[in-house]
Amino acid sequence: MGKMDGKAAVVTGGAAGLGAAVTELYCREGAKALGKSIAAEYGVYNIRSNVVRPGGILTGMAAARAVKSGFDTVELHLAHGYSPHEFLSPAFNHRADEYGCSFENRSRFPLECIRAIRRNIPSDMPLFMRIDSQDDYLEDGLTLEDIIAFCNLTKAEGVNVVHISRGNPITLGMKFEVGRYST
């Protein structure tokens, strides 16, 4: 592993994502507009394959720019509705091509991003990956078992650290477990 002095770059994946569209719709129409209709209207299955393929390459290019700028760590943000998360999640990904349906196909774009990052950073530079522990409260979303299986795949691709997070742009992770407060 390389020297760790606190300069980390976060890359989010190169294909157009759902996050901005969800935020705009939420601001315009409120929480009642959130749900399956958003995934249907804005989901990753509307992105043509000829746009998806270069997405992984663009992610690698972003990592190369981070290295050139002096960052010593790169983290792929594969959570919270960013493109790699949308491709991995069956709740968002309803594609019928090589990037959809099966777990293997849904894993393809995120793994392409990881490979592209690894090709564009020094071999001793740590590669972090932020991923949701599951798709909270999202019907047909990623399960804990899906996440464990995917993380096992990423280890073989050179991910050094997994940063487990929580939440997605549809349910907004608004339910939290809070212990009883006593005075």
Image (cartoon, grey):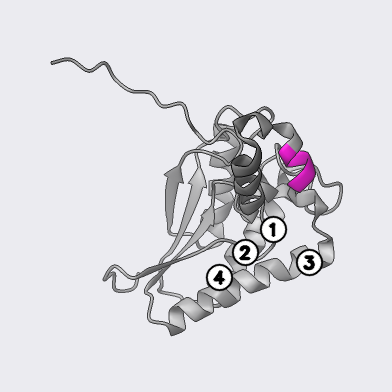
Going from N to C along the chain, the mark reached first, 1 or 3, is 3
Does residue 122 appear in this view?
no
Q: Which residues are magenta?
A: 38-42
Circle 4 residue: 117
Please state which amino acid type lies under the numbered disc 1. Phe
Which of the numbered marks, if any, corresponds to residue 109?
1
Q: Earlier in the sequence, mark 3 or mark 4?
A: 3
Instruction: Name the residue type under label 4.
Output: Ile
Within 10 Å of disc 2 (Cα), the crowding (few <14, some 14-19, many 20+) is many
Q: CA distance from mark 3 to mark 2?
A: 14 Å
Q: In the figure, is residue 81 to the left or right of 8?
A: right
Numbered label attached to residue 51: 3
Viewport quadrant of the N terminus: bottom left
Q: Nearer the viewer, residue 72 or 183?
A: 183
Of marks 1 and 4, which one's residue comes earlier in the chain?
1
Residue shown at the point (65%, 29%) measured from the top left: 32
Name the residue beneath numbered marker 2. 113
Choose between 7 and 182: the one closer to the eye: 182
